[in-house]
Image (spheres, rainbow, N blue to C red):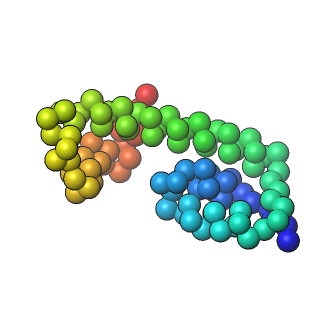
Amino acid sequence: MNSFVDTNVAISYMFSIDPLNNKSMAVFREYDDIFWSNLVKSECRIVFKNKKKILVKFYKDLADDIKPENFHDFKFEDLKKYVLNNYPNGKNVTKF
């Protein structure tokens, strides 16, 4: 069976942290042939580059802000607080 995918399906497949990653993986497992348009391919490249920049910046900021002596005590709840304090509504995420 064939499937045509849009940018969101492709992007969520490429980024394992995407909330829809499992669903997009199911699409790629279920169908024999996956198709997309030249426009989807072009959009996908742009979105991929932007998301990658955002993630690289986030992890660099996080690595700079976590003191080595506190690294082993850093919990998931601490990460959630860090994101909420430093990236409210995603405002700081796109600044490069």
Q: Say whether residue 38 is left or right of residue 64.
A: right
Relative vertical location of residue 70 with respect to residue 81 in this rendering, above or below:
above
For the point 56% across and 65% down, which residue is it?
22
Quarter holding residue 13: bottom right
Residue 18 or 87: which is nearer the viewer? 18
Q: Say whether residue 89 is left or right of residue 34.
A: left
For the point 68% across and 39% down, which residue is it?
45
Q: Residue furthest left?
A: 69
Q: Position of residue 12 (x, y in %)?
A: 59, 56
Image quadrant holding the N terminus, namely bottom right
Residue 45 or 77: which is nearer the viewer? 77
Image quadrant holding the C terminus, namely top left
Q: Position of residue 55 (x, y in %)?
A: 45, 40
For the point 82% across and 57% down, which residue is it?
35
Q: Say whether residue 89 is left or right of residue 3.
A: left
Q: Position of residue 93 (x, y in %)?
A: 40, 40
Q: Position of residue 14 (x, y in %)?
A: 60, 50
Quarter holding residue 68: top left
Q: Is residue 81 visible?
A: no
Relative vertical location of residue 60 with respect to residue 93 in this rendering, above or below:
above
For the point 22% across and 36% down, which residue is it?
66
Q: Say whether residue 67 is left or right of residue 30.
A: left
Badge count:
0
Q: Is residue 34 visible?
A: yes
Residue 21 or 70: which is nearer the viewer? 70
